[in-house]
Amino acid sequence: MEPLVAPCNRHTRDMTMNLDPHTDISTIAGTVARTREAYNAGTTRPLSWRRTQLQRIIDMLEENESEFIDALKADLGKPMVEGFITDLAFVTSEIKLMLKNLTKWNSTERVPTPLVAMPAKSFLMPEPLGVVCVIAPWNYPVQLLLVPAAGAIAAGNAVVLKPSEVSPNVSAVLARLVDKYLDNNAIALIEGGVAETTELLAQKFDHIFYTGNGKIGRVVMAAAAVNLTPVTLELGGKSPVFIDESAKISVAARRVAWGKWLNAGQTCVAPDYVLVHEKVEEKFVDELRKSLNDFYGSNPHTSDSYGRIVSPRHFDRLLSLMNGGTPIIGGESSREDRYIAPTVLGNVNLDSALMQEEIFGPLLPIITVKSSKEAIDFITARDHPLALYVFAEKSSVIDDVLAHTTAGGVTVNGTLLHLTSPHLPFGGVGESGMGAYHGKAGVRIFQHMKPVLKRGTAIDPKMAYPPYTPRKLKIFRKVL
Ligand code: NAD
């Protein structure tokens, strides 16, 4: 039998935490200026250039798959399958959709012209914004950098990319390969943390796309305000789950367990806490236990399918959050390899940090409610969440939750999956963010749909010109 310590050693060996990749700050202004020059020179406008760059991103991911998978493992202990599906394949499938629709999504759209402006044609003409800055976090460090970047490229922009310093192995791989695969005059990558990003944000951009926590979201928005630069903020928050008494409990538990413990709970739309109807609480917890056993075996520490906490700082934060409840499943941890067991907490203190902050880790507080109305009141008394999940067989309960709550997005009888559809724009509302992307929305966000009214000159009715007469007024009253 394999000794229980083996996975710890394996993860420890893989983790090169002393990596600290960063770009020389003195070069940042020049790099951004270079991308602007390329944009102004028209480099990024031809669809052929955009198509080549998008295809090169796919090539970069496919030809270096194992390097990316290793880096994701080193930073997050990410199981190979999770890394492939949620980081690499997610990007390539979004880009394939962009390539398929590149011409269509960059074509003018005819719209009607009102009588008063006739004779004329009206259309919306998509044009790029200019130079876009994309700042990404560490939890899906490839996907959250490259999907918005691809949207910006598909829309014809120059792009400056800033991966997270908290996932340094992925940052280093991206820096090397972006340099090698893409047109560096128009697509640049800056590495680093607060100092480098502060310098980056001091430059003028035409759009800033930031994914991360709301505190830094405010810093980004304040920096953008100086240049009146529009922002997209993809933030987080506490995404609730409601389990109604009518729900299919075994299915609900399995789907909650999958969405919660994927990437060790470090997912922006992971279930943060569960509101469960008191009549089904015991069965729900039993089924969660069964699902965890099916997924990760009796000791998740030894499972190849379970990830790790990204850094000792996040590990310590999560351990202190555990004081907000009593573990009824899990609770074990090992700082050495940043392991925290899938943990379910009962006896939850609503005033504790566990219930006041986004958890963003493998702890799941369970709170009982007496009705769907109580669950709705609990949710609406708090910030609008990024995601909301309701499990019920009764459609009246589902309809009630949908009608009386506000959230960035919803999956009914499931978790996370609304995020995977390119037809459902993904983003937050209120405290969970502003702006949405994926699919067509992920290109539109980086375009200005320029309204154009094009008049003919064959006829030029005198009606609209002075001198104004009572007769003209009478006609205007009829047509306007
Ligand atoms: P992080 O620490 O990697 O920070 C995000 C980015 O902000 C990094 O690139 C970092 O370098 C930069 N940054 C940090 N401090 C800065 C400063 N003072 N000035 C300018 N830039 C700065 O990631 P994080 O914030 O810990 O990410 C986790 C959060 O992101 C969670 O709240 C999560 O819910 C949210 N998130 C949201 C989404 C989404 O799509 N809505 C996706 C993933 C994560």
Image (cartoon, rainbow, N blue to C red):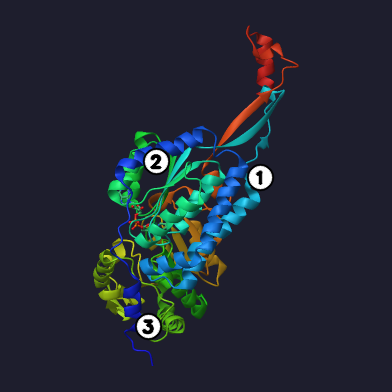
Q: Secondary structure at mark 1?
A: helix
- Mark 3 crowd level (few <14, some 14–19, many ≥20, 10 Å Cα): some
Which residue lies under the disc numbered 1? Answer: 104
C-alpha span from label 2 to label 1: 32 Å
The answer to whether the residue bearing label 2 lies less than 8 angstroms from the nearest atom of ligand 1 is: no
Q: Is residue 90 above or below residue 187?
A: below
The answer to which of marks 3 and 2 sits earlier in the sequence is: 2
Q: Quarter of the image holding residue 280? A: bottom left
Of tags 2 and 1, the one toward the viewer is: 2
Q: Ligand 1 quadrant?
A: bottom left
Q: Which residue is mark 3?
A: 302
Q: Label 3 to label 1, Cα distance in Å? A: 49 Å
Which residue is depicted at the point 50% across and 37% down?
A: 129
How many neighbours does mark 1 have within 10 angstroms: few (below 14), some (14-19), or many (20 or more)?
few
Q: Quadrant of the C terminus?
A: top right
Amino acid type shown at disc 3: Thr
Q: Answer yes or no: disc 3 within 8 Å of ligand 1.
A: no
Kindly identify which residue carries mark 2. Answer: 31
The tag earlier along the polypeptide, 3 or 1, is: 1
Horizontal arrangement in the rendering, residue 241 relative to residue 447 (left or right): left
Image location (x, y in percent) of residue 160: 43, 45
Q: CA distance from mark 3 to mark 2?
A: 45 Å
Question: Where in the figure is residue 366, as x and y percent of width and height?
Answer: 36, 73
